[in-house]
Image (cartoon, grey):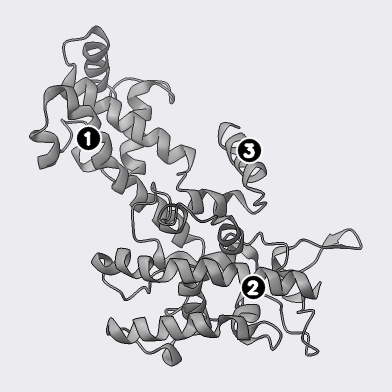
């Protein structure tokens, strides 16, 4: 209930009415079950390392020793903490003292809890990424093929770029503070009202299929997805030519695969603000600095063209 209420509030605020799963990825909000696991593992750290002399810690450690032999209720704190370690796939250190990285070991006593929580965030992020990719385990690499839904479309376009800490806001929302990135957010999150596949249509009391939403500007009836409108549609593909020229030059300068060798999903992904999946992480910041202003200009221009045609 808490997670659903938060996501619905954000969607109303941002006017981005997409799947909660997509909103959480785009805004760096981990699933509640993983956030609870992080808090429980951090509590285990406090009870076994930081505050071992408190009454709560002594009771916890006593019950933890006999957890397997006694018929403890499922939702007791020791069982929930054990399950949290399994959820984050760090159960090898449980029930003993937790593993402490160098940053935690060298921290001042009052800061150890904070540093340990920071150490756990990439672990939670990795667990979240595993959950995301398990939804479509048969996805080819590089991404290609038919799309079955907005969730599937978002996954194919952006899942290879989810290599950073998912707790953080994506760079396109933070690096150009003087620009409004909301249109790019809606385009990325499958909720732009000018893209036909982003809109829901009810026909005969049934929701229409994703691939039945044909492009309004093409007589062939091809699916009017963001990939089609950005790269293929005769009415709108010319808008992206300047941006594609910039991206082609940057790919060449950074020794990445040539633009013409990429699939349409791989081409659309950098147009929507993702660094190339083959680009080393240390160059991501420079890449985004070079491309985001042009991407935001392109999205504004594309919106203008689409609004004028409707």
In this view, the residue farthest toward the left is 106
Residue 40, placed above or below residue 186 = above
Q: Measuring 39% from the left and 51% from the top, which residue is drawn there?
A: 166
Indicate which disc, 2 or 1, sits on the residue closer to the N terminus. 1
- Report helix, strand or loop for mark 3: helix
- Report helix, strand or loop for mark 1: helix
On the question of residue 122 being in view, the answer is: yes
Quadrant of the rendered image containing residue 260: bottom left
Q: Whole-Å distance between the Cαs marked 2 and 1?
A: 45 Å
Q: Which mark is residue 302?
A: 2
Q: Measuring 60% from the left and 64% from the top, which residue is drawn there?
A: 187
Please give left or right for residue 25 compared with residue 198 in the image: left
Q: Nearer the viewer, residue 74 or 141?
A: 141
Q: Which residue is mark 1?
A: 116
Quadrant of the rendered image containing residue 75: top left
Q: Measuring 67% from the left and 82% from the top, which residue is drawn there?
A: 236
Tell me residue 10's x, y (percent). Answer: 60, 42
On the question of residue 100 being in view, the answer is: no
Residue neighbourhood size for the residue with mark 1, other residues' Cα within 10 Å, grouped as few (<14), some (14–19), many (≥20): many
Q: Nearer the viewer, residue 101 or 219?
A: 219
Please give left or right for residue 265 compared with residue 60 in the image: right
Residue contact between numbered discs 2 and 3, judged by CB atoms under 8 Å: no
Residue 65, placed above or below residue 119 = above
């Amino acid at each position: 209930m808490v997670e659903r209420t938060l996501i619905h509030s954000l969607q109303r605020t941002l006017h981005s009415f997409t799947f909660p799963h997509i909103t959480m990825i785009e805004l760096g909000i981990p699933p509640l079950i993983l956030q609870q696991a992080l808090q429980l593992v951090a509590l285990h750290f406090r009870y076994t390392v930081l505050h071992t002399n408190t009454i709560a810690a002594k009771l916890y450690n006593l019950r933890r020793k006999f957890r397997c032999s006694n018929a403890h209720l499922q939702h007791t704190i020791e069982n929930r903490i054990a399950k949290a370690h399994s959820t984050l796939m760090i159960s090898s250190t449980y029930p003993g003292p937790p593993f402490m990285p160098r940053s935690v070991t060298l921290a001042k006593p009052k800061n150890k809890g904070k540093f340990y929580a920071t150490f756990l965030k990439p672990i939670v992020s990795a667990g979240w990424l595993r959950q995301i990719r398990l939804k479509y385990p048969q996805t080819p690499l590089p991404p290609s093929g038919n799309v079955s839904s907005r969730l599937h479309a978002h996954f194919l376009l952006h899942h290879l770029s989810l290599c950073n800490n998912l707790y953080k806001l994506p760079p396109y929302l933070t690096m150009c503070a003087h620009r409004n990135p909301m249109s790019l957010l809606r385009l990325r999150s499958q909720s732009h009202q000018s893209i036909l596949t982003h809109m829901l249509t009810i026909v005969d009391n049934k929701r229409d299929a994703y691939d039945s939403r044909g492009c309004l500007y093409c007589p062939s009836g091809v699916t009017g997805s963001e990939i089609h409108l950005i790269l293929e549609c005769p009415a709108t593909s010319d808008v992206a030519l300047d941006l594609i020229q910039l991206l082609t030059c940057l790919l060449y300068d950074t020794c990445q695969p040539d633009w013409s060798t990429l699939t349409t999903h791989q081409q659309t992904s950098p147009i929507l603000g993702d660094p190339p999946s083959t680009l080393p992480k240390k160059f991501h910041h420079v890449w985004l600095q070079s491309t985001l202003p042009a991407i935001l200009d392109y999205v504004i221009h594309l919106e203008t063209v689409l609004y004028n045609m409707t």
